[in-house]
């Protein structure tokens, strides 16, 4: 395992983290007695495998159903000074409710403290205000710090980039969990802002949200050889020195193996990925045009500034990489959350377009004459019965 300084926390963070939202038994809270023995054994084997590999950062959340409770059966048996535990608690209307939620987390984990506590899903300015308001959640988290129950405070986010940057620039947070990878460069300004504040940077779901790379299309497999697509994506992220760790959402012990194998190239990342990066760029430009591939997002407002709150940026992103790399199933899975996942996947799909109003909103885009047609094509390509977030399944 390789390690990086996790920003101003000074934690020595493994570059791969053990994410806690795929190995749990259920997405709902339940008594430990109702969890089948085989399910618990699989989780514990996954945690022990991570620890043996040097992946000593275990990340979970109050919103991950039975995850915290199941972890509470194994984490107290590991050397506490050799594990880094993070949980996440959603913003609450009052400090008291936030503390109550945290108390449930710490009780389930059976630990005296967590190394990192994130506000889970700071996805809108309203939720940011809920965290920052006098007497609110942040003050409650600071109290938990003073009591020694929390070491560092951060936030996780699925927000538009402008909201993420504003949250980072408050200077209140030690680290950030966010999306950024080969098929999503939109959040690069947020990573740069985090670097200026010396924050730890944790990349959420680079494999699944990064293209469903656990089951990649054949075209992408060929383009990424001799690496697997998920390995290229790992190294692409880690090429950036101010990206510190990638979440590996392991469902079973063997899910770490390909990611760990990628680290054999850790000290020659640029040399290894450059030819693959060149092929990927050339193929994308061949499929969608060089101008589009390089500039598709320029002048496109965030969904809150679009009539009907159509998430044009997200739809264009999905269309671009689906066309370039055959990432159709991934694009469908993301597209069909639009309008059905609240602030976790903000904005709406392109089912209902007010063409004159939308054209006016897109007037700054160099592709304003093409975008409405692409939105219609994307809806035809991707739309199916609305999806639910995993936690709602």
Image: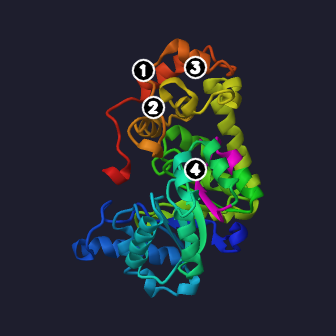
Disc 4: CA contacts within 10 A as few (<14), some (14-19) or many (>=20): many
How far apart in space, not on screen, are marks 4 and 3 (Cα)? 24 Å
How far apart in space, not on screen, are marks 3 and 1 (Cα)? 14 Å
Q: Residue at the spot x=67%, y=75% of the render?
A: 12
Q: Is residue 321 magenta?
A: no
- How is the structure coloured here? rainbow
Q: Quadrant of residue 316?
A: top right
Tell me the element at label 4: loop
Disc 2: CA contacts within 10 A as few (<14), some (14-19) or many (>=20): many
| Viewer-nearest of discs 3 and 2 | 2
| Viewer-nearest of discs 3 and 1 | 1
Q: Position of residue 199 (x, y in %)?
A: 69, 62
User: Can the viewer see residue 56?
Assistant: no
Q: Determine which residue is flagged by label 4.
A: 179
Q: Position of residue 311 (x, y in %)?
A: 52, 32
Q: Are marks 3 and 2 in contact (CB under 8 Å)?
A: no
How far apart in space, not on screen, are marks 3 and 2 (Cα)? 16 Å
How far apart in space, not on screen, are marks 4 and 2 (Cα)? 19 Å
Q: Are marks 2 and 1 in contact (CB under 8 Å)?
A: yes
Q: Is residue 178 magenta?
A: yes
Quick one: which residue is furthest to the left in this view? 34
Q: Determine which residue is flagged by label 2.
A: 348
Q: Quadrant of residue 155?
A: bottom right
Tell me the element at label 2: loop
- Numbered circle sitting on residue 371: 3
Q: Position of residue 127 (x, y in %)?
A: 52, 51
Residue range of the region highlighted in magenta in the rendering: 172-190
> Mark 3 vs mark 1: which is more N-terminal?
1
Q: Determine which residue is flagged by label 1.
A: 352
């Amino acid at each position: 395992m390789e390690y990086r300084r996790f920003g101003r926390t000074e934690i020595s963070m493994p570059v791969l983290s053990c994410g806690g939202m795929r190995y749990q038994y259920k997405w709902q809270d339940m008594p430990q007695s109702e969890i089948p023995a085989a399910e618990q054994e699989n989780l514990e084997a996954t945690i022990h495998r991570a620890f043996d590999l040097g992946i000593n950062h275990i990340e979970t959340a109050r919103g991950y159903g039975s995850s915290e409770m199941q972890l509470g059966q194994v984490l107290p048996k590991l050397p506490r000074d050799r594990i880094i535990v993070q949980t996440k608690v959603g913003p609450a209307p009052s400090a008291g409710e936030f503390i109550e939620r945290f108390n449930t987390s710490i009780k389930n984990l059976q630990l005296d403290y967590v190394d990192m506590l994130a506000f889970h899903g700071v996805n809108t300015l309203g939720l940011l205000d809920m965290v920052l308001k006098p007497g609110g959640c942040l003050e409650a988290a600071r109290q938990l710090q003073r009591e020694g129950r929390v070491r560092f405070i951060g936030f996780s986010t699925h927000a538009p980039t402008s909201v993420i940057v504003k949250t980072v620039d408050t200077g209140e947070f030690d680290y950030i969990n966010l999306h950024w990878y080969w098929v999503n460069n939109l959040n690069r300004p947020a990573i740069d802002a985090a670097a200026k504040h010396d924050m730890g940077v944790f990349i959420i779901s680079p494999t699944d949200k990064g293209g469903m790379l656990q089951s990649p299309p054949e075209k992408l497999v060929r383009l990424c050889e001799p690496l697997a697509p998920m390995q290229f994506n790992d190294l692409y992220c880690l090429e950036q020195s101010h990206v510190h760790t990638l979440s590996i959402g392991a469902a079973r012990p063997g899910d770490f193996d390909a990611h760990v194998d990628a680290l054999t190239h850790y000290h020659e990342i640029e040399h290894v990925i450059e030819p693959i990066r060149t092929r990927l760029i050339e193929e994308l430009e061949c499929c969608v045009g060089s101008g589009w591939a390089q500039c598709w997002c320029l002048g496109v407002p965030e969904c809150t500034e679009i009539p009907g709150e159509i998430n044009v940026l997200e739809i264009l992103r999905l269309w671009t990489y689906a066309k370039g790399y055959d990432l159709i199933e991934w694009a469908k899975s993301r597209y069909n959350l639009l309008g059905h996942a609240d602030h976790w996947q903000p904005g709406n799909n392109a089912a209902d377009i007010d063409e004159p109003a939308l054209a006016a909103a897109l007037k700054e885009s160099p592709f304003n004459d093409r975008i409405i047609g692409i939105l219609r094509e994307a809806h035809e390509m991707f739309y199916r019965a609305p999806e639910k977030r995993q936690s709602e399944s």
